[in-house]
Every structure is written in C-alpha cells, then in structure tokens.
Image (spheres, grey):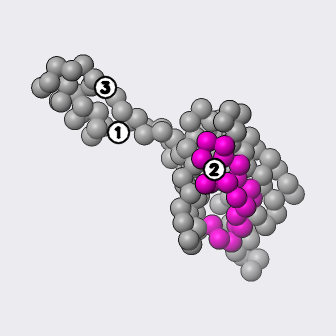
Amino acid sequence: MTETVELRNKPELKFILNTDEFNVIDASEPKNNGTYSYTEIKSAELNSERTNWLISILSVIVDFLTGSGNGGKFKTKANLILKTEKRNLKIWLNDANYGKAKKITELINKNKTYTQQRL
C-alpha cells in the first residue's frame, strides 16, 4: 500500500505513505525531509491557523501609544507537528490544502497505532 498525498505544489510539500513508514518531502524546510517509521512517531498533531490575541492586543496598545499605525491581527500559521523519540518536526502548512493535512494526520495516527499493535 503506497499512497502519495501532495499538500502544496510550490514549494513542494508531499507525503508518501507506505505500509510501515512514510516519506516527507518539504521543499520549504529541507530539514523535515526524510523517511520515518510509524513506530518512532509518538503523535501527529494538526494545528489550524488562529489569531494570537495577546500579540494582537499588545500591538494595538503600542500603536495607540506611539501612533505608528502598525497594530493589527497577528496569526499563528497552520502547522503539523510530528513528535518522535528524538525530535519534533514542525511542518508549516502555508498555502497548503488543510483538508489533505487533516487526512494525513489521521492516517499517520491510525498507522502508528496499527503498527504498534502488530509489534
């Protein structure tokens, strides 16, 4: 079973899911590239884009005090965090298909559980 899911075309962000492992191809962050076994994944967590209200409020206050005109909403971009024994991968999902990212997260978590049960 091999399934390729492309989340973004430029810069390329692709996951190739195999039976016991998956490959990450991330052109925007090459340090994320590699092959990862489902058994080494502790968790896969998908975070949606959301407004950072603390920074937004502070920027409006500073803008009011200084009159600089730079205040506004600050957003934390959507990302996928893969936690392993040795490190955490943070894959930024700028201009990526969020629905496909949700599918990838579910598949990794499902295969992680299935692989661990087989052992």
* CA gap, disc 3 and disc 2: 32 Å
Q: Residue at x 66, y 36 (%)?
A: 11
Residue 77 pos. (x, y %):
48, 39
Q: Which residue is mark 2?
A: 30
How many labels were placed on the picture? 3
Residue 6 visible in the snapshot: yes
Residue 38 pos. (x, y %):
70, 66
Q: Amino acid at mark 3?
A: Gly
Q: Residue at x 60, y 47 (%)?
A: 29
Q: Residue furthest bottom?
A: 119
Secondary structure state at the residue bearing disc 2: helix
Badge 2 crowding class, 10 Å Cα cut-off, few under 14, some 14 to 19, many 20 or more, is: few
Badge 1 crowding class, 10 Å Cα cut-off, few under 14, some 14 to 19, many 20 or more, is: few
In this rendering, the answer to whether 26 lies above or below 89 is: above
Q: Quadrant of the N terminus?
A: bottom right
Asked if labels 3 and 1 touch by Cβ distance under 8 angstroms, the answer is no
Q: Residue at x 59, y 32 (%)?
A: 95
* CA gap, disc 2 and disc 1: 27 Å
Q: Residue furthest left?
A: 65
Badge 3 crowding class, 10 Å Cα cut-off, few under 14, some 14 to 19, many 20 or more, is: some
Camera-side mark, 3 or 2: 2
Numbered range of the magenta stretch: 22-41
- Which image quadrant for residue 61? top left
Q: Which residue is mark 3?
A: 72
- Which image quadrant for residue 82? bottom right
Q: Which residue is mark 1?
A: 52
Residue 22 pos. (x, y %):
75, 59
* CA gap, disc 1 and disc 3: 11 Å
Residue 102 relative to residue 65: left or right: right
Of callouts 2 and 1, which one flags the residue occurring earlier in the amino acid sequence? 2
Q: Amino acid at mark 1?
A: Asn
Q: Amino acid at mark 2?
A: Pro
